[in-house]
Each structure stands twice: as C-alpha cells, then as structure tokens.
Image (cartoon, rainbow, N blue to C red):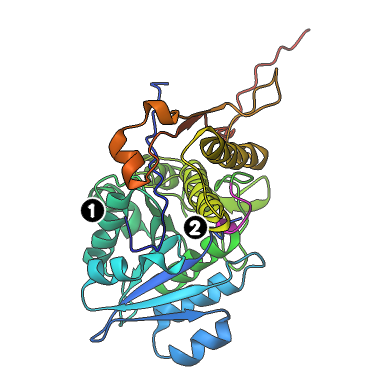
Amino acid sequence: MGKNLSDVTVKLNVEQPSVPVNMGNLAIFVKGETPKAETFSSYDDISGVYSENDSINQIASGYFAQADHGDKLFVFTYDNLNSVAETYYGEGWEFATVVGSDGANPDSEMAALSNYIDGKDERFAITAYPATETTVSKAEEIRNRFGNARRTIVFVNGEDQSKAFYGLGALIGAVANELVGSVTWKFRKIGGVKPVNLTVTQIQKLHDANIFTYVTKAGINQTSEGKTIGGEYIDALHGDDWVKASIETELQKLLSSSKKLSFDAVGIAQIDATVTQVLSQATNNGIILENAETGMGKFAVTTVPREESPASDISSRQYTGLSFSYTRAGAIHSVVVSGQINL
C-alpha cells in the first residue's frame, strides 16, 4: 500500500458473479526536475502559479468551475512518476492524471500512472482526448494502450486537447465529490462542457472500447456512460474505495481514542460494531444493496474470538480475525419497456 501513517489495513476481495471521507480530490502529475507537492483550493491560486501551462490551467478551470468540486487540487511535479506517486500517496487524492509541459497528452506517462493505480487496486487514473474522428478511429488502440485497466477512466470531449482537459477537470469536479453511492457517473450534467459533434455510430465505437463522452438526450446534456476502460462501473469501484477508507478511518479512531482496546470479547465486539456501523452507513448512501424484507444492508461481518486467534497475533497485539462481505447496490442505466396496443 501507499505511505499512510496508520495502524489499520483493509483488504478488499471483490467476488464477481457471472451474471465522511473526501473522495473527490484530483491530483495532476507534471514532469519536472525537482519533485514536489503543491495544494490549491481555488482556480485563482493555481492559475497564478501555472499561468504558462495550458493543460494544468484548463483542468483546474473545469474542476473549480463546478459547484461541488473537492476541497483540494494537487499538483505533483515528478522526475520519476512511480516514485513520486508513492511518496505522495497519503496526501488525500482519489483521482489522478498526467499532463505535459507543452499542452500535449503524454500517453506513455499516463499509461505508467494507469499501471501504478491498477497495481494498488484503489483510486482512479483519468485522461481525456478530444472528440474528433481521429480519436474515434483510435478507440481500440487507446483501450489497448491502457491494457483494459479496471481503474482508468477515459473521457472524450471538446474539439481539441485543451478543451478535453477542461472537460476532464469538470467531470471530476461535478461528480466525484457527490455523496459516494448516491450517484452514477452516467447521465451527469457538467458545467461548461459542450455535447460532442459525433454520430451515434461513432459514439458506439467509443462505448465498445469502454470510453465515454458527453451527449444530449431528451434535450438534456449528460455523460454518455460511466465505465472505466476495463469495463467496471466507476460508482461501484468508488463505493468500494469509500468503504475501505471509512473502515480504516473509523478503526484508527477507535484505536486512538481507547485507553486500551482489550484483546478479548469486549475489544473484538467494539471492532465488530465499528465495521458494522460503516457498512450500515454505506447501505444508507446507496453503496450496499438493501434487503427489501428486513430493511438492512446485505452485508456480513465476521470475527474470530481470542481463543481461536493465533498465539503470534496475541503476542504481537495484532488482530487479524475480522472479515466482511457485501453486495453492491448497482444502478439502472437503461430501461426496456414492453407494451401492448389493443385495437
């Protein structure tokens, strides 16, 4: 995992059948000689520092133009991308992109970031391309470039790369900081982004490569899909990240606020109750499916008593006997209606 000062490690194992943590902060990686981390809370702050970098300016402009944007935007200057990403992993970003110093989209560096985040199996890499015939023709090439990464988002919008970067920032600013679990990334309206001038066939080609764009449906401007390049739904993975981050945070609070968390039935029950509370909140937020009969979330928390814990765990004061599982709530992205006409 990244360099977080924490005594809690949560591992998620997602089993797929055949059929308050800020989760909307964006990080921009840019090549430079001296690695450093900078944090900005407004467009005026960042535009004054990066007035000559159009890519950073456009992303920041789109991000801060949205009413519900995250409270921070990070700029990480890197000489070695993986090294800097690891160094600043604990800074509180959930989404990340790479820009060039010349306004270009640095594909190789973006692929490196995509691989890094996919290896972590948490957070998201995001990049954008202009809505042109050239981009459409290279849709499969783009997907292959990122190797069907399950945590990489590709958003096509704008008539050129500068506008595409604006749309990238605007997408994260508009959707990412909404209550996790309460929104899907399809059907979302983004301020300042124009619908693309592409045919239905061209848009379908993008969708076939798990790339989405910005369109008009029923007179409403909206995102055309909400998947990563690997075909995962963004809101589902974002929900998993919320659960993981929230459990880590709440268990750390429990450890830090307790005079002593005893390694017995009482202490273990407190751990169980903390995780159960987070999963109940995840149910209320729309991350976890609710059981229609009981009104409770479809999740389970399991603990192992002290008597069945390894002696090595007891001597090292490390409890490893808690596990949990849950069923994602999902969302409806299309509707098929059957009707009958009586003559």
Please state the horizontal and vertical placement of residue 68, each as a whole percent of the image. 65, 64
Which span is picked out in magenta?
175-180
Residue 159 makes an appearance in the image: no
Question: Is the C terminus in the top left, top right, bottom left or bottom right quadrant?
Answer: top right
**Front position in the image: 217 or 6:** 6
Question: Is the N terminus in the top left, top right, bottom left or bottom right quadrant?
Answer: bottom left
What residue occupies the far top of the structure in this picture?
343
* Residue at 62%, 68% in the rendered image: 66
Please state the horizontal and vertical placement of residue 25, each as a whole percent of the image. 51, 65
The dot on residue 145 is: 1
Determine the secondary structure under disc 1: helix
Q: Is residue 131 above or below residue 60?
A: above
Q: Is 177 a magenta residue?
A: yes
* Residue at 46%, 53% in the rendered image: 198
Crowd band around label 2 with a 10 angstrom C-alpha radius: few (<14), some (14–19), many (20+): some
Dominant secondary-structure state across the stretch colored magenta: loop
Task: Report which residue position mark 2 lands on.
Answer: 197
Q: Mark 2: which amino acid?
A: Asn
Q: Mark 1: which amino acid?
A: Arg
Residue 134 image-quadrant placement: bottom left
Q: Is residue 147 left or right of residue 201?
A: left
